[in-house]
Image (cartoon, rainbow, N blue to C red):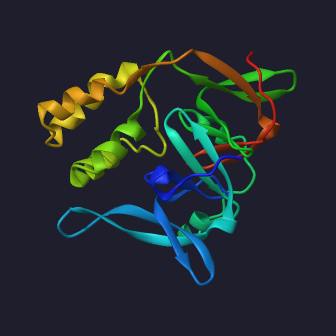
């Protein structure tokens, strides 16, 4: 079991038991009731259009079921449906229509591993499944925004609104030009634009096929059963 400091968790997405993103971790707080994870979110002011960060809530550490570690950094999984309750929705068990919704979303196991991004729907004897793949080249988008936030929080917030780092912690390298264009359009300097190129990483291409019955939830994130996974 690995432990994390508040600094190491800063900016990590916090995902509830329904696979919905509750917000991002912003630190730890000690109270009389115990240790709490501070969670914030970025919201847009409907009158001026400005984006602001505000505190979403304080989560008792007892609600953290696991902390998944992936190439883009940690993802905190909760044992409670916090965001589902906040939105007033119930995700429930996956339905056939969720097959298409799952494509493009990050897949995380309940025992704490980031498998990659769902690339396509597959089929086996009698059941469908999801192919989860890591591309050969990826931009560490979540890590880039976490680093940028300490210097230019406003710019980081605007970029988050354009390409959600919780749904896209790692972006395929084929989309690098799109990200560079977004930086320039949002007011980044050339030094920051060039810095993004340093977050392009070569990763070993691999994939696993997840049988549909082992998919627990399809929300902002796809939650799947734990255990060993092998490629197709």
135, 44: nearer the viewer? 135
Q: Residue at x 19, y 34 (%)?
A: 192
Quadrant of residue 80 within the rendered picture: bottom right
Q: Nearer the viewer, residue 5 or 230?
A: 5
Above or below, 12 relative to 198 = below
Residue 229 at least partly seen: yes
Residue 131 horizontal/vertical position (percent): 67, 24
Q: Residue furthest right?
A: 126
Name above or below for residue 40 compared with residue 223. Answer: below
Query: On the picture, is 159 further left or further right than 35?
Result: left
Image-quadrant location for residue 20: bottom right
Q: Please report the residue visible at 63 percent of the width from the left and 17 percent of the height from the top.
A: 206
Q: Residue drawn at (40%, 39%), measured in percent from left and top?
A: 143
Q: Is residue 162 visible?
A: no
- Quadrant (top left/top right/bottom left/bottom right) for the C terminus: top right
Find residue 124 and report its horizontal and vertical position in percent: 81, 21
18 with respect to 229 (left or right) = left
Kindly identify the residue that appears in the image at 65 percent across and 42 percent down: 98
């Amino acid at each position: 079991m690995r432990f994390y400091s508040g600094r190491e968790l800063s900016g990590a997405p916090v995902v509830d038991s329904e696979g919905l993103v509750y917000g991002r971790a912003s630190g730890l707080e000690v109270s009389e009731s115990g240790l709490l994870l501070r969670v914030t979110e970025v919201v847009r002011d409907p009158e001026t259009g400005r984006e602001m960060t505000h505190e979403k809530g304080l989560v008792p550490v007892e609600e953290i079921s696991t902390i998944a570690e992936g190439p883009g950094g940690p993802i905190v999984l909760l044992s409670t449906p916090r965001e589902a309750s906040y939105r007033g929705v119930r995700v429930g068990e996956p339905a056939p229509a969720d097959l298409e919704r799952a494509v493009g979303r990050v897949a995380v196991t309940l025992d704490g591993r980031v498998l990659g991004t769902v690339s396509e729907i597959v089929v086996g004897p009698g059941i469908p499944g999801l192919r989860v793949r890591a591309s050969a080249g990826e931009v560490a988008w979540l890590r880039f925004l976490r680093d940028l936030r300490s210097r230019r929080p406003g710019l980081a917030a605007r970029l988050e609104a354009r390409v959600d780092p919780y749904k896209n912690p790692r972006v395929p390298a084929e989309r690098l030009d799109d990200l560079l264009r977004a930086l320039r359009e949002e007011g980044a300097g050339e030094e920051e634009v060039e810095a993004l190129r340093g977050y392009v990483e070569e990763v070993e291409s691999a994939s696993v096929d997840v049988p549909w019955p082992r998919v627990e939830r399809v929300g902002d994130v796809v939650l799947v059963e734990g255990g060993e996974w092998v490629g197709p």
